[in-house]
Amino acid sequence: MQQEVVLAMLAKEPSQGSQLRARLDRALGPLGDAMNDGQVYVTLGRLEKAGLVIREGAAGSPARPDRKVYVLTPAGEERVAEWLAEVSWPKPDLAEFHLKLTAAAAAGLADPIGIVDLQRRELLRRLRDVQRAAMAEPDHSDAGLLLEGIALRLQADLRWLESCERVWTDRRNER
Amino acid sequence: MNEPEKAFVRARGLRKEYGSGEGLVRAVDEVDVEVARGETLSIMGPSGCGKSTLLHLLGGLDRPTAGELWLAGRRIDGLSERALAQLRRHEVGFVFQAYHLMEELTAQENIELPVLLAGRSPGEARRRARQLLDQVGLADRADHLPSALSGGQRQRAAIARALANEPQLVLADEPTGNLDSAATLEVLRLFEALHAAGLTLVIVTHDERIAATANRLISMRDGAFVDETHLVGGTKGNLADLAGLGS
């Protein structure tokens, strides 16, 4: 889990670790299951060490003086603002697969179309899992929106694989 | 002429040609296919690959040029027009991209119509329509004309109509082609409920996201099958990894 995510989740209001966890679960739905509580607390510990958050006694809960809330420091607020303004996007790693096909064909080691087929099947099964998770979400859920994004990316990958298959089939037929 | 009923739908060497001589087009070219009872099969391919024509053949909306076709163990490729119409009315439900609802009838009346055409009483038709509208979540839209319904609601009404005479087979041609993602999910949920109830579904689509929800996917090009994927069974990845949440 990226530190900035936990930091930004704190920006709404000073919160306990369990409240942060609940916020993440709402946003991620079934995808949140992979995360364990430990990850959130480890991240909070690191953020505290870096001076981006501090722990304070919770106001208004005198009955539970042991419960502490995490609060953003001014440096933490600044880091959140920077992170929100950053333009970053995960890089799709297609070159490796592309080169795998090229190398397999050049060396005559494997049929590129067979490689494409295996990959295609795997992506279709993943897409099925994603779609079933999306179908299980209530309408307009945050997690549903994330799942839609995953499904669209898989669809884009599948369409590219279709192009790969077409081109490599044509090349095989030309030989 | 009857086959032991292993495959609910079975085609052998199915062919559909249009035109003649130089202009001869084989829209469906020697297709063999079997769909098990209770299976959801999707057929995917680019427009013009013959997938809609194949669906029409399977449902008796169109006649093959050659080949053999069985439905529920009964040979249907040689049926008379009259017998085919009976088959379409009682044994097959169709769902189309453009809904094909009667615009001058309410949602309720659209569903009653096939029940009445099947020779059942107005009271029965009314009850059946009410029950189906409830099942597809449109109980409060019964008296609306299709024009007063959203795309997703129209398609749900069309699915209810397809189920009017309790078919065992539902054939859907680009059922979500006109729908946004929320309405698409509603349609997929309905299909999942039909699957859970034991219906056999064949879905034709060019959208991988729809096709991937089936048990099995067949890819079609130039009138023929080029690939088949069994989709049930675990994947190596998990959802969180796909979202970039892996630790």
Image: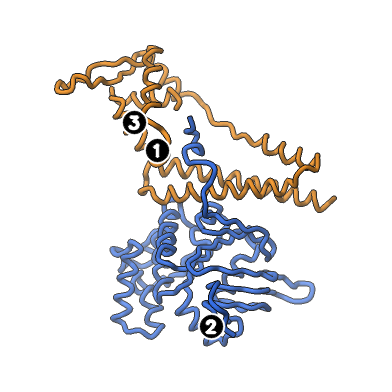
Chain colours: A orange, B blue
In the picture of the structure, the residue carrying the numbered disc 3 is: A21
- Closer to the eye: label 3 or 1: 1
Give coordinates of residue B2: x percent, y percent.
Answer: 57, 83
Give coordinates of residue A92: x percent, y percent.
Answer: 59, 35
Figure check: A26 above or below B20:
above
In the picture of the structure, the residue carrying the numbered disc 2 is: B84
Chain at numbered mark 3: A
Give coordinates of residue B206: x percent, y percent.
Answer: 58, 57
In the picture of the structure, the residue carrying the numbered disc 1 is: A33
Residue B199 in the figure: left or right of residue B57: left
Chain at numbered mark 1: A
Q: What's the amino acid at mark 1?
A: Asp
Give me the disc on residue A140.
none
Give the quarter of the image for residue A93: top right
Residue B28 in the figure: left or right of residue B79: right
Which of the marked residues, 3 or 1, is nearer the chain's N terminus?
3
